[in-house]
Image (tube, grey):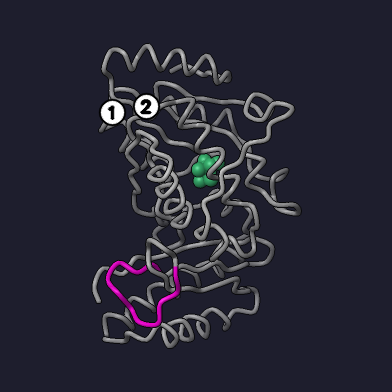
Amino acid sequence: MKLIPDPEKISVVIEKIRQLKKRIGFVPTMGALHSGHFSLINRARKENDIVVVSIFVNPTQFSKGEDFKEYPRRFKKDIGFCRRLGVDFVFLPDRNNMYPEGYSTFINVDNLSDCLCGVSRPGHFRGVATVVAKLLNIVHPDTLYLGQKDAQQAIIISRMVKDLNFPVKVKVLPTVRQGDGLALSSRNAYLNKQERSVALVLSKALRLAETLISNGQRNCGRIISRMKQLIERNKQAKIDYIAIVDPEQLKELKKIAPGCLIALAVKIGKVRLIDNTVIGCA
Ligand code: PAF
């Protein structure tokens, strides 16, 4: 496994591999790797000749007052995980080689970026789209692997890839959960023991929605209000949003439709967590 911090160098190395007609799978991360990332890396390993993982805590996707400085950085441990999972290249750029002085170009995926998480995280998806576009141009993979836990991010990146004709296939893999239902997230590391048990309200609210739907409820307003009631029983849980939207435009729905996305963000103490489910039936 090779660690490469320089964007130009990794582009050259990968271009040589590409000329040998090898398939390249890419998993972009901000580090603090957990089983959610491992499932992406394992899938990339199965489906490609070469696996590239990037580890970069991207400053442009954090708004003022967010946790950029505190975001868990465990690069040594992450590199160990990558080695064990059979990653070929870890791309570890620093801020200066991703955003050198004078950097001025940003990508905005209109309409999809200002709703749901975009309301309380203005500019977040502009930073995500920009860094992923840069990473795709640097790594030039055949397949990009993303997690469903960040559903809005996956939808925005898929839109950008389509709109800007990036020659890459996007694969979105299911959310990995702990045994009690908590979706894995690097931010779970901020939760104390008691907050961690409160954090189960996110997955419980989603399971409640699924049960209501399988019992025939189709009215989104009613489903959301039952989810709210469940969450608000916990004083430490503050709802940021609960929404039921179509998975392409992210427009709020009145009635459950096949493939709709139920997404929520809840603050547990100071930690903002997200989760979602996709409804197959209708
Ligand atoms: O999901 C993440 O960890 C980040 O948003 C990503 C896609 C690596 C871009 O910085």
Mark 1 Cα shell of 10 Å, populated few (<14), some (14-19), many (≥20): some
Numbered disc 1: secondary structure: loop
Position of residue 28 measured from the top left corner of the image (x, y, whole percent): 47, 36
Region in magenta:
251-261
Please state, as top left, top right, bottom left or bottom right, where the C terminus lies in the image: bottom left
Residue for badge 1: 48
Viewed as shown, does residue 20 lie left or right of 133? left
Amino acid under label 2? Val
Secondary element type, mark 2: strand
What secondary structure is the magenta-colored segment mainly?
loop
In this rendering, the answer to whether 163 lies above or below 210 is above
Q: Residue at x 40, y 21 (%)?
A: 88
Q: CA distance from mark 1 to mark 2?
A: 7 Å
Which residue sits at x=61%, y=51%? 124
User: How packed is label 2: few (under 14 Cα within 10 Å), some, or many (20 or more)?
Assistant: many
* Quadrant assignment, res 188: bottom right
Residue 191 locus on image (x, y percent): 62, 58
Q: Which residue is mark 2?
A: 51
Please report the residue visible at 50 percent of the width from the left and 38 percent of the height from the top: 132
Task: Find residue 222 and report its horizontal and vertical position in percent.
Answer: 43, 88
Q: Do the CB atoms of the residues marked 1 and 2 lie less than 8 Å apart?
A: yes
Q: Tell me the quadrant of the picture where the N terminus can be found.
A: top left
**Callout 1: CB less than 8 Å from ligand 1:** no
Type of the residue with mark 1: Asn
